[in-house]
Amino acid sequence: MKSNKYCVIMAGGIGSRFWPISRKSTPKQFLDILGNGKSLIRSTYERFVNIIDTENFLVVTNEAYKSLVKREIPELDDSQILCEPFGRNTAPCIAYAAFHLKAINPQAEMIVTPSDHIITNEMHFCEVMLQSLDFIKEHSDAMVTVGLQPTRPDTGYGYIQIAENCGHKLFKAKTFTEKPKLELAEIFIRSGEFFWNSGIFIWKANTIIDAMRLHVPDIYELFASVENSFNTPREQAAIKNIYTECRAISIDFGVMERCDNVYVRCSDFGWSDIGTWGSLYQQLNKDERANTSGEKLYMFDTHNCMVKMPKGKVAVIDGLDNYIVVDTDDALLICPRENEQDIIKYIENIKFDNGIKYI
């Protein structure tokens, strides 16, 4: 009998904070960022295939990246790759997947995950996913998000405050805060009530569709207006039509922050979203001076630096402390690690002067 459990991988982002390695033509989720021989999206698929049947995967991506998805996950059929004409953030992406799954299986239970996370304890991760699926089976209107035990007052993550304990490390969600200032993040850590928002969600397809009807009715109405097209040859044309009218909004801001049936599965399975060079720096091996190591890298009086160079290229770095240095064939980034959030600003300046050639 076909399982009701599905995995939806969101893979439409550009990953601009990983410039100049990540480009519009080949975003970071399709790259071997860690140097372990696997792209991030391939690792995501392999992590979930332990608990979800291959035929029950969906990948939602930009139509320009369909061939990259096929390259990285050749086990998927074309029908399992849902193509957005352009990005509209996570709420429309999830609406697309939920309506599509509802057309396939009205009883569908969804795990929704980004394509670019690192999980070091995959066995515990799978246990958390299965426990969360069991919870939404018992509580049909529940929406579960995974909260991670914070290890530092990071200002680049969203935070979820938990309320009463519902058992099995599940808590009612109380408040959401997106990327707080350092002082507030430090208060969150000291309180013990706040967890990092992983962006991994577990719910029934019908539950999230009902929540969108209540909290983002404009998006709901667009997808509901073409409901009879899902899982038919008319689907792609319908999607192209409604996306021109669909606003960009995140699922957290549009839905999760407004609902009273959100639960947090508090976890600690060695997670990083690899959203910035700084988060990658935390994952890589380092030398005795806390610099990332690499072949043909010669560093003098240099400390705490994130350095990534093309294979076979010799680099000499002298006198830097706490910098990001990333070199490619046509672009070079050198900036203080504390300024990594400014990479978006750098890209805008480059785009203004040169168009999209280097983006």
Image: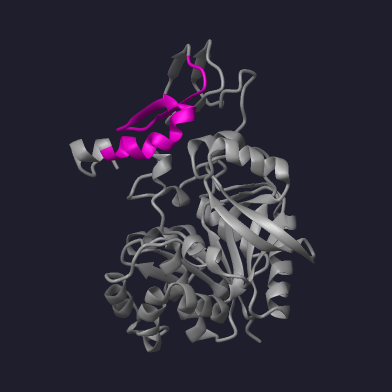
Q: Which of 144/331 is in front? A: 144
Q: Where is residue 268 in the image (x, y as percent from the top left)?
A: 72, 50
Above or below: residue 319 compared with residue 343: above
Above or below: residue 315 compared with residue 340: above
> Residue 65 magenta-drawn?
no
Q: Is residue 308 visible in the rendered structure shown here?
A: no
Q: Where is residue 145 in the image (x, y as percent from the top left)?
A: 62, 62
> Residue 342 magenta-drawn?
yes
| Left or right of 291 in this view: 333 | left
Magenta stretch, residue numbers: 320-348
In the rendered picture of this protein, how many numbered marks are placed on residues?
Answer: 0
Q: Which of 70/15 is in front? A: 15
Residue at 44% over, 30% down: 339
Q: Which of 289/99 is in front? A: 99
- Image quarter for residue 312? top left
Q: Position of residue 265 (x, y in %)?
A: 70, 61
Q: Is residue 296 visible in the rendered structure shown here?
A: yes
Residue at 55% over, 61% down: 113
> In which quadrant of the rendered image does the N terminus lie?
bottom right
Above or below: residue 194 compared with residue 55: above
